[in-house]
């Protein structure tokens, strides 16, 4: 079936003009075919006898199909280019795209490999490359990062790379934060438990703090210290969960959420926070916040946390549903301390109304690793410690 | 949902728009009484009348120029160059009049110029070109190149409704060879890219006929290869490109057009500039060498990017 | 000309005076370094653009060229905006996007030119094609020079207009020179004779007689409206200044200039209008004052904001076609009245 037009792919035999067995001359019309565009006859490619008709009247076949055989079958009635049937140019000149440039003998790291190694804290010298010539590839770095276990990063992208964004789009950092939050909510079975807490003693402690101390700024360092102590009693919450792998940690590497205003938020980690006093925690928090706002945090300082505290209460909110900081299993939310009228028992066992500074402690926790009773117990321990706080 | 060929989808878009909007009309050589060299407008003159399916003189500059004139007094002309190659004769009107008018005067020029493009059937140097890069380079022109029947209909509709001059590349090789489900009724396809096949190990970026070649070349490579169909060259879907690069870090770009300054060259520059830190290997390009497309089958086959050449480039980069 | 009222004839003169005064002022500013780029004018050719534009109705559409400033003035574009356009100011007709006479205010029904000549012949043909497709009583008109007739677009447009019998008027502004190229080197056969070969009439008219130009175009327009198709009107005139301000015209024989200077189109019209008892001097003074004020306004206008340089390449939303421009000929008022009378109550 000939190709009668650049876009034609098939044709129909309308009628045979010669019968099988009849003699034919070269160029003699043998049959009529119809394509989308035109009806035409097909001339014989050779003189001889029409030996066999392979496509009958009314049949539609693809371009290139053999329609009939002439003579003893040596001449085929077929027209149009037939793919694959080739003569001399079987190995037609190959146009080959240039091969990638040869590399030097010293280790070469592609841009993505360098970046990922830095972000994940992977030492490339220790990675086996599976690429050509032993080159370390993207998947090798990612595999090494996975293998390092609890060193999974909080963000998969450096938040500090400046990039001009067209108006109307989220900044790169926003998108990174958003992706992390979304991933957390998609991964964890996030639940939140709240508990009221009397902050009278905490407030008293803050008022009594030395003028030069940083404790007076917010109750956060006190709550942080109390939370660390509570974690010692409830180690199930000082843990990470990655996929099926649940790991409790002895050390408390405490993440503290720092707001960067419109730019977003970041969670620097105080390593070995359990070894620090309240004052030392206050110093560390303030220092990390300061460096965070100046974009001076290193990647090491934003990963490896085992538990996180967030304190949006300084802006006046009462309750919230914080998002767990992957791959941790819980996050503590400290909201505003407000004066409320509460009912307490006096020394004689009577109910009296008093005005006391109160706050609502919130804990978001992952139901895959914990249950409500554990969450409530942790909060209960934390409350006890705060309500009995003694400086 | 009806199944249509790529060509039928183009006809369908034209028919729907002409029925819905009396300002839309077709103009070109042999489009009326003859129904078009490729039969895209077969039956149109009967339905819409000869005036609206205009058989023009053989005059590409005037086809484009008169279309501009008609457009600025309220019509929506859809002109056809019989072969994409002949747009060279109307280049001046398209680039200098149509493309530059809105920028200078705030005057919109809503025309569509349909270009039956591409090779693969011994069309030779003057019937096989892919000239999209000329027009990507001209400010004020939009350029689209569908690869599927569904997109052919949707993009042509979008082009007709666009208030700007749109160059519409319809690949001749796909006219009857590509079929697909095409929604009935009028719809617009956005001028964005489309993931033809998602993957994670490597991305092949292509458009037009090369999308099909890319899909075939990467079907059984034993790797997860993403194929990104650009669909629109101006505007170019930068976000889709960069997202794919971030995902796979290995890129092969395929142009059926001649290599130097083809659309793929722009895509490669964009990736090198904006996604350097995502790359795990050099950006590879597969394109026709810088020669006029030859006529004889073995010569043409050696020039146009083949499934094998695309597959080899992918295999090579995957191994890197 | 009975078609022209007294007021019309004054208006023809006024528009020509305005064109000359604006171009004179712009040339001065150019020499003072305030007009960027190059400077082109139509000195001595004012009747061709003013006369022809005067015959065009409000719904007709025009494609003028660089020596046709008069057309923009007839259609209602303000002198201050034109001078700002030359000065490249934000308030210029194109806001600095294109320069000198490369402008067209869409609201006035005029599409601005491109430098490739005569591309606009094809565009005007297309406008006429649309009018005919829609069965509208409207005409398109374009100007082009003797040099432009040598390029392919001339042939394509003439042929197309003739084959489709379109309502378009082609005004060939024969000013004897295309830059330094005289007619003898431009064509072997007078283009006006070639019109016949494309299937429609060509006629020659004195390009320095505004009323003759008006009449020729008026008749051509009538023919087009009656379904008679295109007309080529050759307006013979002389380019009295160089191709551009940077051209000293040394290739033009001085006798030729002297001869044409005696036939200045403005002086001709002044004589006519003077005979009607109009105070020509007062008119001149009025025009000069108007241009002086316009120049002051234009010079005070700010340059365009560079931040906008990359905006406006693409249109968004529903495209707006060219609008109706001013059409001061009294005949159009009569036409409108006649239409209103004929319309059913």
Image (cartoon, coloured by chain):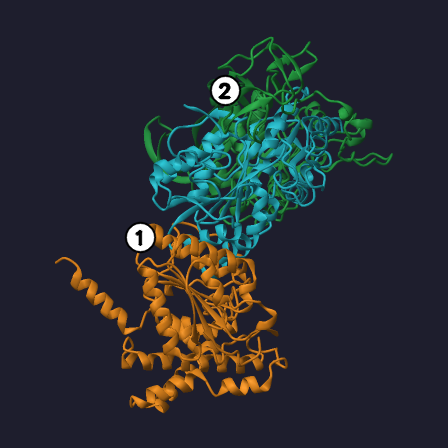
Residue projecting furthest to the right: A105
| A282 vs A143: above or below | below
Q: Nearer the viewer, residue B201 or C282?
A: C282
Secondary element type, mark 1: loop
Q: Residue B125 at x, y = what percent? A: 66, 40
> Do labels 2 and 1 touch, CB within 8 Å?
no
Rendering coords of residue C186 (x, y %): 59, 68
**Do dots 2 and 1 share one subunit?**
no
Give the labeled residue for mark 2: A367
In front of the other: A374 or A213 = A374
Q: What's the chain of the residue with tag 2?
A: A
Color of chain A here? green
Structural distance between the alpha carbons of marks 2 and 1: 75 Å
Q: Which image quarter holds the N terminus of chain C?
A: bottom left
Colour cyan belongs to chain: B
Callout 2: helix, strand or loop? loop
Q: Residue at x 64, y 18 (%)?
A: A25
Position in image of residue A336 (x %, y %):
44, 40
Residue visible at 36% across and 74% down?
A: C214
Residue A279 quadrant: top right
Say whether residue C225 is left or right of residue A181. left
Residue that appears at 38% across and 50% down: B75
Q: Which mark is residue C135?
A: 1
Please give the letter of the chain rendered in orange: C
Q: Residue furthest left?
A: C345
Q: Work out whether residue A260 or residue C218 is closer to the camera in this orientation and state it.
A: C218
Which label number is shown at residue A343?
none
């Amino acid at each position: 079936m000939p190709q009668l037009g650049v876009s034609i792919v098939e044709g129909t035999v309308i009628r045979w003009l010669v019968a099988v067995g009849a003699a034919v001359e070269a160029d003699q019309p043998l049959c009529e075919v119809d394509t989308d565009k035109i009806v035409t006859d097909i001339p014989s490619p050779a003189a001889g006898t029409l030996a066999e008709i392979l496509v009958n009247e009314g049949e539609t076949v693809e371009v290139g199909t053999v329609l009939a055989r002439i003579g003893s079958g040596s001449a085929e009635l077929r027209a149009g280019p037939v793919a694959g049937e080739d003569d001399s140019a079987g190995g037609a000149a190959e146009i080959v795209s240039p091969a990638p440039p040869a590399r030097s003998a010293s280790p070469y790291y592609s841009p993505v490999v360098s970046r990922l190694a830095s972000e994940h804290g992977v030492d490339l010298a220790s990675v086996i490359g599976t690429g050509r010539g032993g080159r370390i590839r993207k998947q090798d770095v990612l595999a090494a990062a996975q293998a390092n276990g609890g060193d999974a990063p909080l963000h998969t992208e450096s938040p500090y790379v400046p990039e001009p964004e067209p108006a109307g789009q989220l900044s790169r950092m926003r998108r990174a934060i958003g992706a992390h939050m979304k991933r957390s909510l998609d991964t964890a079975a996030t639940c939140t438990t709240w508990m009221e807490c009397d902050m009278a003693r905490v407030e008293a402690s803050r008022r009594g703090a030395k003028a030069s101390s940083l404790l007076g700024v917010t109750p956060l360092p006190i709550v942080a210290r109390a939370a660390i102590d509570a974690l010692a009693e409830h180690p199930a919450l000082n843990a990470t969960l990655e996929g099926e792998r649940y790991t409790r940690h002895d050390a408390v590497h405490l993440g503290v959420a720092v707001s960067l205003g419109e730019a977003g938020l970041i969670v620097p980690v105080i390593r070995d926070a359990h070894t620090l006093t309240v004052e030392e925690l206050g110093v560390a928090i303030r220092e990390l916040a300061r460096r965070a706002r100046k974009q001076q945090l290193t990647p090491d300082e934003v990963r490896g946390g085992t538990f996180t505290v967030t304190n949006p209460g300084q802006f006046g909110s009462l309750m919230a549903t914080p998002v767990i900081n992957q791959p941790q299993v819980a996050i503590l939310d400290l909201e505003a301390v407000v004066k409320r009228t509460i009912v307490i028992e006096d020394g004689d066992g009577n109910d009296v109304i008093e005005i006391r500074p109160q706050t609502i402690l919130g804990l978001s926790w992952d139901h895959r690793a914990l249950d409500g009773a554990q969450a409530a117990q942790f909060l209960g321990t934390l409350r006890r410690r705060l309500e009995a706080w003694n400086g | 949902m009806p199944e249509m060929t790529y060509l039928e989808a183009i006809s369908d878009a034209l028919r729907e728009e002409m029925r819905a909007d009396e300002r839309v009309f077709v103009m070109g050589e042999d489009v009326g009484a003859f129904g078009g060299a490729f039969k895209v407008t077969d039956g149109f003159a009967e339905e819409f009348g000869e005036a609206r399916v205009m058989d023009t003189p053989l005059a590409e500059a005037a086809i484009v120029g008169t279309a501009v004139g008609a457009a600025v007094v309220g019509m929506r002309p859809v002109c056809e160059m019989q072969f994409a190659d002949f747009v060279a004769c109307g280049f001046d009107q398209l680039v200098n009049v149509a493309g530059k008018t809105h920028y200078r005067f705030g005057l919109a020029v809503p025309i569509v110029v349909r270009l039956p493009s591409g090779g693969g059937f011994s069309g030779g140097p003057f019937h096989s070109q892919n000239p999209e890069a000329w027009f990507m380079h001209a400010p004020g022109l939009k350029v689209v190149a569908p690869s599927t029947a569904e997109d052919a209909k949707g993009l042509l509709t979008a082009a007709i409704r666009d208030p700007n001059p749109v160059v519409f590349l319809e690949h001749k090789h796909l006219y009857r060879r590509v079929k697909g489900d095409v929604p009935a009724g009028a719809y617009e396809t956005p001028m964005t890219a489309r993931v033809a096949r998602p993957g994670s190990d490597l991305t092949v970026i292509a458009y037009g006929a090369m999308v099909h070649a890319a899909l075939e070349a990467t079907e059984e490579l034993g790797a997860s290869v993403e194929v990104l169909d650009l669909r629109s060259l101006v505007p170019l879907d930068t976000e889709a490109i960069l997202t794919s690069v971030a995902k796979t870090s290995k890129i092969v770009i395929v142009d059926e057009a001649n290599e130097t300054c083809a659309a793929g060259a722009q895509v490669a520059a964009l990736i090198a500039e904006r996604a350097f830190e995502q790359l795990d290997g050099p950006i590879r390009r597969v394109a026709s060498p810088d020669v006029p497309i030859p006529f004889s089958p073995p010569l043409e086959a050696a020039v146009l990017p083949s499934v094998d050449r695309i597959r080899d480039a992918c295999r090579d980069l995957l191994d890197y | 000309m009975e078609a022209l009222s007294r007021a019309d004839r004054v208006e023809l003169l006024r528009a020509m005076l305005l064109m000359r005064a604006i171009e004179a002022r712009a040339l001065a500013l150019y020499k003072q370094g305030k007009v960027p780029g190059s400077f082109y004018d139509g000195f001595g050719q004012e009747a061709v653009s003013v006369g022809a534009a005067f015959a065009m109705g409000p719904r007709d559409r025009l494609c003028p060229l660089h020596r046709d400033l008069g057309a923009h003035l007839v259609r209602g574009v303000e002198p201050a905006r034109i001078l700002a356009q030359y000065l490249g100011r934000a308030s210029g007709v194109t806001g600095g996007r294109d320069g000198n006479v490369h402008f067209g205010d869409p609201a006035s029904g005029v599409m601005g030119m491109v430098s490739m000549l005569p591309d606009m012949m094809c565009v005007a043909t297309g406008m006429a094609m649309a009018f005919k497709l829609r069965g509208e009583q409207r005409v398109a008109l374009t100007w082009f020079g003797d040099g432009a007739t040598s390029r392919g677009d001339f042939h394509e447009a003439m042929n197309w207009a003739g084959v489709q019998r379109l309502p378009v008027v082609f005004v060939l502004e024969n000013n004897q020179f295309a830059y330094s190229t005289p007619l003898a080197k431009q064509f072997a056969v007078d283009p006006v004779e070639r019109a016949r070969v494309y299937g429609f009439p060509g006629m020659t008219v004195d390009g320095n007689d505004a009323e003759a130009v008006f009449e020729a175009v008026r008749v051509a327009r009538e023919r087009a409206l009656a379904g008679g198709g295109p007309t080529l009107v050759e307006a013979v005139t002389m380019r009295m200044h160089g191709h551009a301000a940077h051209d000293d015209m040394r290739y033009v024989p001085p006798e030729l200039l002297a001869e044409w200077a005696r036939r200045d189109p403005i002086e001709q019209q002044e004589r006519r209008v003077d005979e009607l008892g109009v105070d020509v001097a007062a008119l001149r003074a009025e025009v000069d004052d108007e241009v002086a004020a316009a120049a002051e306004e234009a010079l005070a206008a700010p340059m365009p904001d560079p931040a906008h340089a990359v905006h406006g390449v693409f249109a968004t939303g529903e495209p707006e076609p060219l609008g109706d421009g001013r059409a001061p000929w009294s005949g159009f008022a009569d036409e409108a009245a006649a239409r209103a009378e004929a319309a059913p109550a």
